[in-house]
Amino acid sequence: VQLQASGGGLVQAGDSLTLSCSASGHTWGLYGMGWFRQAPGKEREFVAAISWSGESTKYENSVRGRFTISRDSAKNTMYLLMNSLKPEDTAVYYCAEDRARHRFPLSDAVYEYGYWGQGTLVTVSS
């Protein structure tokens, strides 16, 4: 499986940004997907997850209501719409695929995601 994250950039606080993650390599539609982020000097942390069907989602508390995760199975692509960005959202954002098919409830644990994209940097200035 190959995951390619894109869409990062430099924005101002309050702006919006959409990240994309394109996938190739196997039957992508059978696995849940997630977004994680890692700020300088910090551990990688969970941001959001979406089920294999796209019907279920899960968010980290600090982004709930501001970020929206979605997926387009026809395009093998996952998205993260980020609104009302804050300086504390600054990080490298990674997309990842769950190790298990059809997992429910969705996982927020780094170790339960087996394939990772290369990351895309989001910088939010104040």
Image (cartoon, helix red, strand yellow):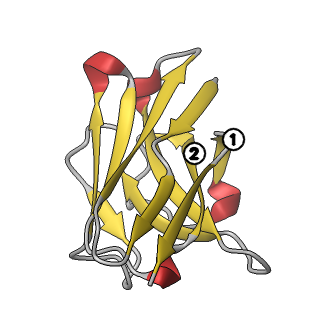
Residue that mark 2 sits on: 96
Which residue is located at x 50 percent, y 53 percent? 9
Give x and y (percent) for residue 5: 54, 38
Task: Give the class, few, some or many, for how many residues have Cα within 10 Å of label 2's Cα (few <14, many ≥20).
Answer: many
> Whole-Å distance between the Cαs marked 2 and 1?
10 Å
Give x and y (percent) for residue 97: 55, 41
Image quarter where the N terminus lies is top right
- Disc 2 element: strand
Q: Is residue 33 left or right of residue 98?
A: left
Q: Amino acid at mark 1?
A: Gln
Looking at the picture, does residue 123 appear above or below residue 94? below
Image quarter where the C terminus lies is bottom left
Task: Give the class, few, some or many, for how many residues have Cα within 10 Å of label 1's Cα (few <14, many ≥20).
Answer: some
Of badges 2 and 1, nearer the viewer stands 1
Residue that mark 1 sits on: 118
Give x and y (percent) for residue 69: 30, 53
Looking at the picture, does residue 22 appear above or below residue 24? below
Which residue is located at x 27 percent, y 17 percent? 74
Outermost right residue: 41
Which residue is located at x 41 percent, y 62 percent? 48
Q: Amino acid at mark 2?
A: Ala
Q: Is residue 51 visible?
A: no
Residue 38 picture quarter: bottom right
Residue 25 picture quarter: top right
Q: Earlier in the sequence, mark 2 or mark 1?
A: 2
- Disc 1 element: loop
Frontmost residue, 12 versus 78: 12
Looking at the picture, does residue 119 appear above or below residue 43? above
Which residue is located at x 41 percent, y 41 percent? 102
Q: Is residue 54 visible?
A: yes
Q: Is residue 103 left or right of residue 37?
A: left
Q: Which mark is residue 52?
A: none
